[in-house]
């Protein structure tokens, strides 16, 4: 073991492994602990970076999920709307008259989703139709007041049909 003095009046003792031990009075910091602060700083920076990446990932994942669900719903609406094809099979004049409407599409039609016009004037209130839901290739009968020679038009979301009352 040997004793050394440097210019700042700190005393060092040489230990058998070749390391120096500080005996500086008033300085409680160990000579070996000076490299720990940068390591802790790097670990904290890595933790903050991982947390920010995790929050960003969660945010964008929610955006992509919402966008995907909205797109899926829009595609389903387009498919349903294009699958609703209205065709007037028969229009009988009278007060009340009867209009027979067939669903030629591939999706069911609710009678509340189409409008009935006589001579381009919308029928208000909406004519009563039985049944109120028309399955593909099925018919519904609606009560409409129309005179002979009047034009009846039924307009739905995906299509429309015209017929002359007889």
Image (cartoon, grey):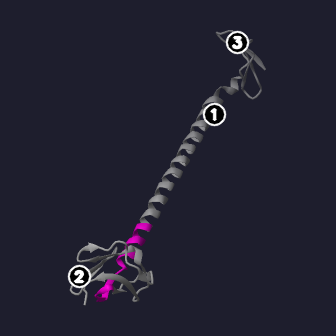
The percent coordinates of residue 38 (x first, y second) are: 60, 31
Mark toward the viewer: 3 or 2: 2
Residue in front for this viewpoint, 84 or 140: 140
In-image side of 145 versus 67 (left or right):
left
Q: Are marks 1 and 2 in contact (CB under 8 Å)?
A: no
Residue in the picture at 76% in, 24% down: 15
Query: In the image, which residues are magenta?
Result: 73-96
Q: Position of residue 103 (x, y in %)?
A: 37, 85
Disc 1 crowd, CA 10 A, few/some/many (<14, 14-19, 20+): few
Q: Earlier in the sequence, mark 1 or mark 3?
A: 3
Point out the tag, 1 or 2, that comes first from the N-terminus.
Answer: 1
User: x%, y% of residue 14?
Assistant: 74, 21
User: Disc 1 marks which residue?
Assistant: 40
User: Which residue lies most toward the left here?
Assistant: 149
Up-down relation of residue 40 to residue 31 (above or below)? below
Q: Position of residue 140 (x, y in %)?
A: 40, 86
Q: Give residue 10's mark.
A: 3
Q: Is residue 91 left or right of residue 2?
A: left
């Amino acid at each position: 073991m040997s004793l050394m003095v440097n210019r700042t009046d700190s005393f060092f003792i040489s230990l058998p492994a070749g390391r120096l031990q500080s005996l500086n009075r008033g300085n409680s910091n160990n000579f070996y602990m000076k490299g720990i602060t940068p390591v802790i700083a790097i670990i904290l920076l890595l933790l903050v970076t991982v947390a920010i990446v995790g929050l960003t990932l969660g945010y964008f994942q929610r955006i992509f999920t919402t966008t995907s669900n909205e797109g899926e719903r829009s595609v389903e609406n387009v498919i349903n709307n294009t699958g609703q094809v209205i065709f007037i099979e028969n229009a009988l004049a009278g007060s009340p008259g009867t209009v027979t409407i067939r669903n030629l599409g591939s999706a069911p039609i609710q009678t509340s989703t189409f409008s009935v016009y006589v001579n381009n004037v919308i029928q208000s209130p909406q004519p009563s139709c039985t049944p109120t839901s028309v399955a593909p290739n099925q018919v519904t009968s609606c009560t409409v007041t129309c005179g002979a020679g009047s034009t009846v038009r039924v307009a739905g979301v995906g299509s429309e049909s015209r017929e002359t009352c007889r």
